[in-house]
Image (cartoon, helix red, strand yellow):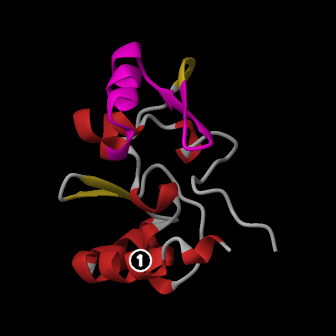
Amino acid sequence: MAREPEVFQNPVAVNAIDPVAYFKQQKPVPGQAAHARRWNGAEWRFANENNANTFAANPEAFAPVFGGYCAFAASRGYLAPTIPEAWTLYEDKLYLNASLRAQELWLRDVPGNIAAGLGNWPGILG
């Protein structure tokens, strides 16, 4: 079995949503191809040049944990895609989920789910 990419791409990282916007605007904001950057094997898109430069200066601070795959799924030992609307900022880190239901389950025990997900990561990539 081929190893899955470290970053969820569909076909652009995190559904072409600007990851910096989750921190600055507290919501998912579509990124633009004109403000794209490459990092960790993926194309990331940003709403504006400032966000693109902010990300480029410190991508680990803004990229979602678990490569943008569903954080709840990672806590359970498997990979799942994500949707932009199901997100959480916790201790200055971004976590994405596959659905609003997965987000609801994730929020029941964020620290425990993070610990479980980190225990499974990156082994679940294949």
Would residue 88 be counted in the magenta stretch?
no
Residue in view at x 41 percent, y 58 percent: 86
Residue in view at x 33 percent, y 17 percent: 50
Rendering coords of residue 116 (x, y %):
37, 83
Q: Is residue 29 left or right of residue 12?
A: left
Q: How many marks?
A: 1
Residue in view at x 38 percent, y 39 percent: 59
Residue nearest the observer in this picture, 70 or 1: 1
Query: Is there any visible trace of residue 10 in the rendered image?
Result: yes
Residue nearest the observer in this picture, 44 or 98: 44
Rendering coords of residue 8 (x, y %):
59, 54
Residue in view at x 48 percent, y 73 percent: 121
* Residue at the left extreme of this rendering: 91
Q: Is residue 117 left or right of residue 123?
A: left
Which image quarter is the N terminus in? bottom right
The amino acid sitting under disc 1 is Gly
- Kindly identify which residue carries mark 1: 117
Rendering coords of residue 33 (x, y %):
60, 21
Rendering coords of residue 71 (x, y %):
43, 68
Q: Which residues are magenta?
A: 37-60
Q: Is residue 48 left or right of residue 43?
A: left
Which image quarter is the C terminus in? bottom right
Residue nearest the observer in this picture, 104 or 110: 110
Would residue 43 be counted in the magenta stretch?
yes
18 up-or-down from 47: above or below = below
Task: Count residues near mark 1 (Cα–Cα under 10 Å), then give few for <14, some for 14-19, many for 20+.
Answer: many
